[in-house]
Image (cartoon, rainbow, N blue to C red):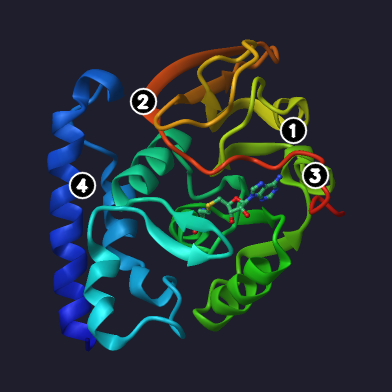
Amino acid sequence: MDGDATIAARKAMVEEIAVEVTGTRKWLGKDCLDRRVMAAMEKVARHLFISEASRPEADRKSAYANRPQPIGHGQTISQPYIVAVMTDMAAPDPNDRVLEIGTGCGYQTAVLAELAARVYTVEVVPELARPAAERLRRLGYTNVETRIGDGARGWPEHAPYDAIVVTAAAWRRIPPALLDQLAPGGRLVVPVDRSRSAARTPFTDQEQDLLLVTKDEKGRTSERKMLPVAFVPLVEGGQNARR
Ligand code: SAH
């Protein structure tokens, strides 16, 4: 698939996102997403993030289908609609510093990097983190810093952040470190399992809510439930969660 074909595929993808946004307006509380967010979705070459090496040429077009895709190591890249919605909720401004938890293949990172001043991204699986860092560097994203570690602890050295985007589902609670590292006026976008405090098996289908947490100038937080979602779990303090 050459340049022109991928441009057309991205245009079609953005149109599909717009239709789905309209169809889910009751959750989102709006009819359309920010124009800058839609422009970033149209610009970032999603197919380059979906395992360049392991997917045959014929599969590239599917990179633009509005559905999640495997990225190896049991992880998935979110469907384009969800990436767009989360980015819109985070509302990154050109001067903003953004923290992303769960680099994965680096696609969401790239979309955020198109819109914010600086993006810090943390991934717990080294085999995903390293190629993602290399890919982002190769694509010219000089405003991105990557690290390998447990993102549930945030990245305190660069805090506070104007926006934090968590692309794996928290279990029972929003990691307190992330709330701490959110700047006054900041937005935290995080999927959290619905039961919160109930003891039952985590992460059956769509049992998470995508939350938008905002912090006011006095440091008080308030949260709003946006959408039912299905994310891979955020591994907290597990054996992989090295620092
Ligand atoms: N934003 C990614 C989607 C990744 S899926 C993309 O655009 O491709 C969720 C990712 O979160 C996975 O790569 C998973 O390994 C990672 N993850 C899970 N728990 C984590 C943790 N505690 N810290 C950092 N990353 C974590």
Q: Is 109 situated above or below 199? A: below
Which is closer to the viewer, label 3 or label 2?
3
**Which residue does the image show at 17% across and 69% down from the upper left?**
9
Report if the beta carbon of the residue with label 3 is closer than 8 angstroms to ligand 1.
yes
Q: What amino acid does circle 2 point to?
A: Leu
Task: Judge left or right: residue 73 versus residue 158.
Answer: left
Structural distance between the alpha carbons of marks 3 and 2: 27 Å
Residue occupied by mark 2: 227
Q: Is 152 situated above or below 212? A: below
Look at the numbered disc 3 and give the secondary structure of its residue. loop
Residue occupied by mark 4: 17
Which is closer to the viewer, label 4 or label 1?
4
Who comes first in sequence, dot 3 or dot 2?
2
Q: Please provide percent x and percent y for residue 74.
A: 55, 58
Report if the beta carbon of the residue with label 2 is closer than 8 angstroms to ligand 1.
no
Structural distance between the alpha carbons of marks 4 and 1: 31 Å
Look at the numbered disc 1 and give the secondary structure of its residue. loop
**Number of on-image labels:** 4
Who comes first in sequence, dot 1 or dot 2?
1
Tell me if residue 45 can be seen: no
Instruction: Using the image, tell me which numbered label, if any, was put on residue 52.
Output: none
Q: Is 186 situated above or below 74? A: above
Residue occupied by mark 3: 238
Which is closer to the viewer, label 4 or label 2?
2
Residue occupied by mark 1: 181
Q: What amino acid does circle 3 point to?
A: Gly
